[in-house]
Each structure stands twice: as C-alpha cells, then as structure tokens.
Amino acid sequence: MGSLCSSVSVMRESGTRIRFTMTLTSAGPVTLDLYDVSGRHVAQVYEGAAQAGETAISWSRGGVRPGMYFARLIAPDGAHGAKVVVQ
C-alpha cells in the first residue's frame, strides 16, 4: 500500500552534503526549505517541479552552521516536515 501523503526524509551523505528524499503522491511544483529552531528561514534546498514517487536531492550545506533544523516540504497535497541535524 502506498503513502496517502507526500513526505521528506533526511540523511547525511558525506562531508558538507545532506541528502533529502522527497516522496510525492502526485507530480507538481514543490519547495523544500530549511528553518532553524526559532523558525527563521535558513536556506531554500529546492524549488521546482518534481514527479510522483521518490526524488533525491543532494544539498551542500555551505555556510549553514552545525545544529538542529527543520525541513519543510510544500507539495501539491500540503506541507510536510522533518528534523535535520547538521554536523
């Protein structure tokens, strides 16, 4: 049985790269943003069209400091979030 809504998951790749995996129930425009624990927008990880199913995005954290963050995916079926630990 498939997921009833879209989701985003996060894992560290190597060095300063972080891998985000978006699983979408339908194709359409999406944005994936990163926020700090106070709710301040830190970075836009992705903005554009994505197909239904799984899409992986490799993102370089650049100047984002180590700490706890929250990823927010806005997809055709709504908003979804995930915790992100930057080391």
Image (spheres, rainbow, N blue to C red):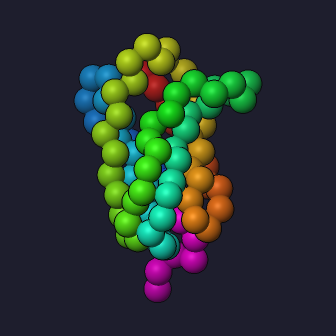
Inspect the magenta stretch and tell me whether residue 5 lies in it: yes
Residue 26 visible in rendering: yes
Q: Nearer the viewer, residue 19 or 40?
A: 40
At 58% across and 65% down in the image, what residue appears? Answer: 76
Residue 61, position in %: x, y? 40, 24
Residue at the far bottom in the pictured view? 1
How many marks overall?
0
Q: In the depicted view, which residue is nearer to us: 59 or 1?
A: 59
Q: Residue at x 52, y 28 (%)?
A: 43
The residue furthest left is 14
Q: Left or right? Give the position of 58 relative to 2.
A: left
Q: Quadrant of the C terminus?
A: top left
Give residue 48's position: percent from left, percent from top: 44, 50
Quarter residue 33 falls in = top right
Percent position of residue 38, x then y: 73, 24
Q: Is residue 81 left or right of residue 39?
A: left
The residue most toward the right is 38
Bounds of the magenta segment: 1-7
Q: Is residue 68 visible?
A: no
Task: State the image coordinates of residue 35 (x, y, percent, origin top left).
Answer: 62, 31
Quarter occupied by residue 77: bottom right
Give the main secondary structure of the magenta stretch: loop
Residue at the image position 40 percent from the left and 45 percent from the top: 20
At 47% across and 80% down in the image, what residue appears?
2
User: Is residue 79 magenta-colored?
Assistant: no
Q: Is residue 58 above or below residue 7?
A: above
Q: Eyeballing the image, is 47 above or below 52? A: above
When the figure is inspected, residue 17 is found, relative to residue 2, above or below; the finding is above
